[in-house]
Amino acid sequence: MKYVLAGQEGMEGTMNAAYILRTEKGFTLIELLISLSIFLLIVSIFPNMILTRTSGFYTDTISSQQVMTFFNQLAHDSRGSVQAEIKEGALYFTMSNNDRIKIELLATHQMRRTRNNEGHNLLLEGVKSFTCVTSTKRVVCEVVLLNGYQSKKSMLIPFERGGQK
C-alpha cells in the first residue's frame, strides 16, 4: 500500500493521519460490518412476514370479533333494506334499489352473502346453526358455532316500500 502526503505528491514521508490519501480502492471493515448487520436484520424479519402472510388469514378458532363482524354486516344490510323475509332457510333483504341480498348457511358450515344471486362473500365459518325471525320493522338473528359459542342480535329495518317510515 502506498501513501502519499497531501501537498507532497512526489515524496514519501511519515504517515500523518489527517493528510493521508489512500490510493487503493475497497471497503473498510466498518463498512462491511454495517452492511452485514443491515442484511442480517432484513433476513431475520423476512420469514416472520412470510409466515404471517400465509397463516394469518386461516385460523382454527372463531372469535367473538368475527361473529360481531358478521352481525355488523347483517345490520348494515338491514339498515339499507326495505323488506326482510325468510325463504328456504335463507334470509333475504330487499334493498331500496330492488337488489336482493341473500344470507344463507351452507352445508360446509359457512355463512355466505350474495347480491342478486351473484358474487360469493364468505361472512363466517364454523357455523352450526343460523336462525332469524322477521317482523315488519325488525330482524332478530341468532348464530350458534360449532365450538358452542352463540350470539344473538336484533336489527331494525328503517324503511318500508314506498319510502314511508
Image: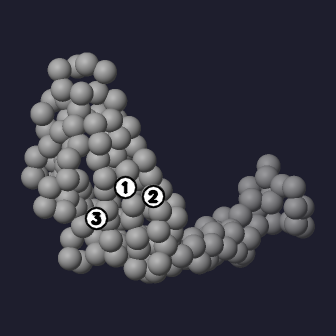
Q: x%, y% of residue 52?
A: 48, 72
Q: Residues within 10 Å of mark 1 (few under 14, many from 20)?
A: some
Q: Amino acid at mark 3?
A: Met
Which residue, given by chain and number where applicable, does mark 3 sit on? 111
- Residue 54 bears which disc, if any? none
Determine the residue positioned at 31% across, 53% down.
Answer: 133
Q: Is the Cβ of the residue at disc 2 closer than 8 Å to that at disc 1?
A: yes
Using the image, determine if residue 160 lies above or below residue 93: above
Identify the residue position indicated by label 2 in the image.
152
User: For the point 59% across and 78% down, which residue is it?
Assistant: 44
Q: Which numbered dot is residue 141?
A: 1
- Taking the image as shown, residue 37 lies to the left or right of residue 155, namely right
Give left or right: position of 147 versus 36. Answer: left
| Residue nearest the viewer, comparing 19 with 32 | 32
Q: Of marks 2 and 1, which one's residue comes earlier in the chain?
A: 1
Residue 29, image x and y in percent?
Answer: 72, 75
Q: Residues within 10 Å of mark 2 (few under 14, many from 20)?
A: some
Q: CA distance from mark 2 to mark 3?
A: 15 Å
x 40%, y 79%: residue:
146
SS of the residue under disc 1? strand
